């Protein structure tokens, strides 16, 4: 299942590029501690945003695993970028709890900044090595647990880079929402 709706809030999983989500108010960056550009998600977002993003990020760095900060989106077609530092799997412990904190903290910032739609990548599942299936379970469980507290956010999108990653998220969404 790639879509789930509860209390007027849509959760969906799609395949795509996180830096190409023009209909979302905010996109989430799987950032590094220094909030600099890099490979993967951070590279795509900083390339799309232009150098103004790195300049705005400088005063917030470094951030800790599980933490999130919010900036403007510069040349990206969104209003905000929310930068999360995911845990490095097997190094930043407890990895599960720190990954859940990323999603909780990003949604808290979205609520505080009047963000109605937010797109997440699969944080920590690239160079940070988190197994995709566990990461999908944590991401979806955390978001589903927070749903009742959301007053502003009404659309949460997971943007997965590959077919296989999308399939894992879609299966996990089905399993997590079974009564
Ligand atoms: P981390 O350092 O948190 O592991 P990465 O950027 O290395 O972050 O990767 C996180 C996930 O995002 C991986 O599953 C990777 O395949 C995926 N990914 C890489 N580039 C993009 C992109 N442009 N849009 C969406 N997902 C992406």
Image (cartoon, rainbow, N blue to C red):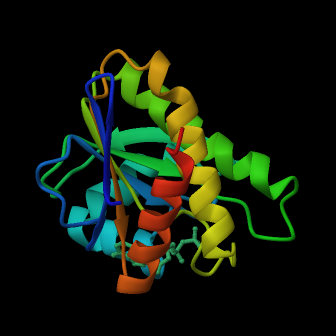
What residue appears at the point 54 percent right and 55 percent down from the top-left corner? 175
Is residue 132 found left or right of 177 in the rendered image? right
Q: Residue 89 lies in what quarter of the image?
A: bottom right
Question: Is residue 105 at all visible to an observer of this figure?
Answer: no
Is residue 86 found left or right of 11 in the rendered image? right
Which percent across, then down, holds residue 118? 31, 43
* Residue placed most toward the observer, 142 or 58: 142
Which percent across, then down, holds residue 62? 65, 51
What residue appears at the point 80 percent right and 57 percent down from the top-left corner? 95
* Quarter of the rendering occupied by the C terminus: top right
Which percent across, then down, holds residue 15? 28, 73
Residue with the most extreme front position: 179
What residue appears at the point 46 percent right and 27 percent down from the top-left corner? 147
User: Image height check: is 70 above or below 6?
Assistant: below
* Residue placed most toward the observer, 122 or 78: 122
* Residue placed most toward the observer, 174 or 25: 174
């Amino acid at each position: 299942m790639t879509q789930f709706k509860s209390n007027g809030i849509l959760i969906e999983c799609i395949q795509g590029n996180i830096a190409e989500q023009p209909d979302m108010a905010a996109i989430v960056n799987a950032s590094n501690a220094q909030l600099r550009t890099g490979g993967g998600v951070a590279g795509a977002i900083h390339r799309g945003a232009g150098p103004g993003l790195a300049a705005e990020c400088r005063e917030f760095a470094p951030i800790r695993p599980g933490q999130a900060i919010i900036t403007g989106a510069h040349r990206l077609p969104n209003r905000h970028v929310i930068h999360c530092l995911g845990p490095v799997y097997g190094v930043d412990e407890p990895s599960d709890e720190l990954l859940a904190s990323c999603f909780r903290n990003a949604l808290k910032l979205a609520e505080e900044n009047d963000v109605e739609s937010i797109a997440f990548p699969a944080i920590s599942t690239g160079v940070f090595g988190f197994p995709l299936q566990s990461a999908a379970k944590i991401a979806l469980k955390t978001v589903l647990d927070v749903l009742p507290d959301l007053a502003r956010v009404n659309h949460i999108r997971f943007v997965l880079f590959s077919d296989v990653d999308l399939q894992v998220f879609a299966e996990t969404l089905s399993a997590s929402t079974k009564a």
